[in-house]
Image (tube, coloured by chain):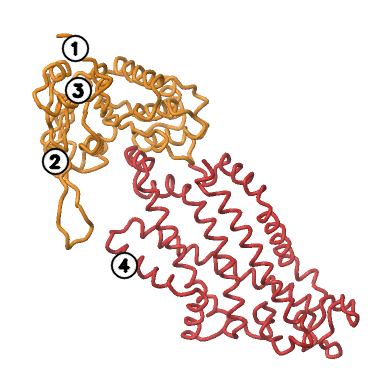
Chain colours: A orange, B red
Amino acid sequence: MANLFSAKDIRKSYKVSNNPLKKGQLEVLHGVNFSLNAGQTLAVVGESGSGKSTLARILVGADKPDSGELLFEGNNILKKNRKFEWYKNIRMIFQDASASLNPRATIRQSLEEPLHNGTHYTASQRRDRIVEVLEMVGLRPEYAERYPHTFSGGQRQRIAIARALLLRPKVIVADEPVSALDVSVQAQIINLLLDLQDQLDLAYVFISHDLGLVQHFSNKVLVLNNGTQEEYGRVADVFSQPKSKYTLELLNASAGYQKPIT
Amino acid sequence: MIKPMVSANQKAAWVIFRHNKGAMIGLIVLSFILLMALIGPWIAPHDPAHQFNTSILVPPIWNDAGNFQYFFGTDDLGRDMLSRLLYGARLSLQLTFMVVLIAALIGIVIGAAAAFINPTLRSLLMRIMDLLLSFPSLLLAIAIVAIIGPGLPNAIYAVVIVLVPQFVRITQSSISEELNKDYVMAARLDGAKKLRLLTHHVWPNIIPALIVQLTFSFSTALLDIAALGFLGLGAQPPMAEWGTMLSESRAFIQFAPWTMTLPGLAIFLTVLSINLVGDGVRDALDPRLNR
């Protein structure tokens, strides 16, 4: 089966200092590989500082990798002229929904932005599409006229999901989309994401440190340790028979994860 | 598309401002001064330059020797103080408005450009701005006037040059700060180009900072223009300008104190009320309080 979205040997390093006299690179990702099909979820797990968020930023085009390939439907989207296709098909949900919404723009204004830049819709088509996605994420269309600070955390994350869905993407990269929410709201958002995946055949790249959630949510898992890909495979395989010591430690340290009965 | 000042935030800001007593008093005094400057030529009893040879140094109305014809008295050349003060308000405020607007326009354009150019060039530009900012504003204005020569137009250029770096710095730093926020990244991933990011996303969020800077620049400009006038480097004598009036009357402070006190009081009240309003605006728009 042809893969929808895959990464080959993605590497990234940052300059340690802006001082041109001091040389030094901090390597954040030492070669990450994965592949993903439509309707599947890949979880990326690891401790803080393991490079999870950097990977997410690279996948959506917010950051450039130093080397490697990102293939979307067989094309390397890192090549320059593919930017448009990239932004349309691979969308991001940020960890902090309130920070990702412009505080001085209404929800409508924020939702208009991707449609304005990514489609040739007329004003009324844009309006209709916004109503449609707001309903998809369980919000009332009249909320569009309000400002972000008038919503709760869960509602804001729904708005962020609506924004990601507007352009009918095939892949959604979610960087810890529920870690800032309380538990009952987390469950609602996770269920919403699962429903949307069923309806729209979306592929998710799900960045998380909650292994219990990952077990429930994902098909594949990629374990990152200090930028090194420790393990990659089906969730059931990796969690029941971890090959690396690091994965085992991570599993033992995790509270939410339920060990399969052997 | 995005209106620069949104109604919800605006209302909240006004509520905070209204409860700030100092700021409200400042606003009332400032409105009164602005009104006087606007209608000055119509309510002034005399021509500000006309010399009444028979009524030299008449004291103001509250003095026993005062005279209803000259409400605030006359100066050493027999010119009516009230009329001169009214025309002076007009001149001072006009100049200040002009200077601040020009400086803001130049400063904001340079500052916005600086936020987007390459880091090395930006460092160089900002260090030049820091150099200009490191001089006390009046000292720098005097130095510039000393180089290009005294006179009102040159004084205006000097004050503009003094004010520009403040606008460059505030614009550049607020834009750079906003550019690092998630919502800008989100807009970039929505496909917004650089110019659109600036005008539609970042700009509405830096307007509060710019408004605060505008009010403080206003008082600096007013004071510097008056100071240059006082030192004889700005507006030249027959002109009814507060700083110049102050300097002309220096010799009479002992036996005709009103000639010096009144223009001084006018400058003091105007600067004080602008600063009070500025403080109020800053508190009302402070994002930390606005949440």
Disc 2 residue type?
Arg
Q: CA distance from mark 3 to mark 1?
A: 12 Å
Q: Quadrant of residue B264?
A: bottom right
Q: Secondary structure at mark 1?
A: loop
| Chain of the residue where label 1 is placed in the rendered structure | A
Q: Secondary structure at mark 4?
A: helix
> Label 1: which residue?
A260
- Residue at 62% across / 76% down in the picture? B226
> Label 4: which residue?
B124
3 or 1: mark nearer the eye: 3
Q: Is residue B270 left or right of residue A75?
A: right
> Label 3: which residue?
A252
Same chain, marks 4 and 3?
no
Question: Which label sits on residue B282?
Answer: none
For disc 1, the neighbor class at 10 Å (few under 14, some 14 to 19, many from 20) is few
**Seen from this angle, which residue lies furthest left?**
A243
**Seen from this angle, which residue lies furthest top?**
A262
> Label 2: which residue?
A11
Q: Quadrant of residue A129?
A: top left
Q: CA distance from mark 2 to mark 3?
A: 29 Å
**Residue B246 on image: x %, y %:** 68, 81
Q: Is residue B268 left or right of residue B214?
A: right
Instruction: Decide which of tag 2 and tag 3 comes sooner along the chain.
Output: 2
Q: Secondary structure at mark 2?
A: strand
Q: CA distance from mark 1 to mark 4?
A: 61 Å
**Residue B141 on image: x %, y %:** 50, 78
Q: CA distance from mark 4 to mark 2?
A: 33 Å
| Chain of the residue where label 3 is placed in the rendered structure | A
Instruction: Decide which of tag 1 and tag 2 comes sooner along the chain.
Output: 2
**Residue A45 on image: x %, y %:** 21, 28
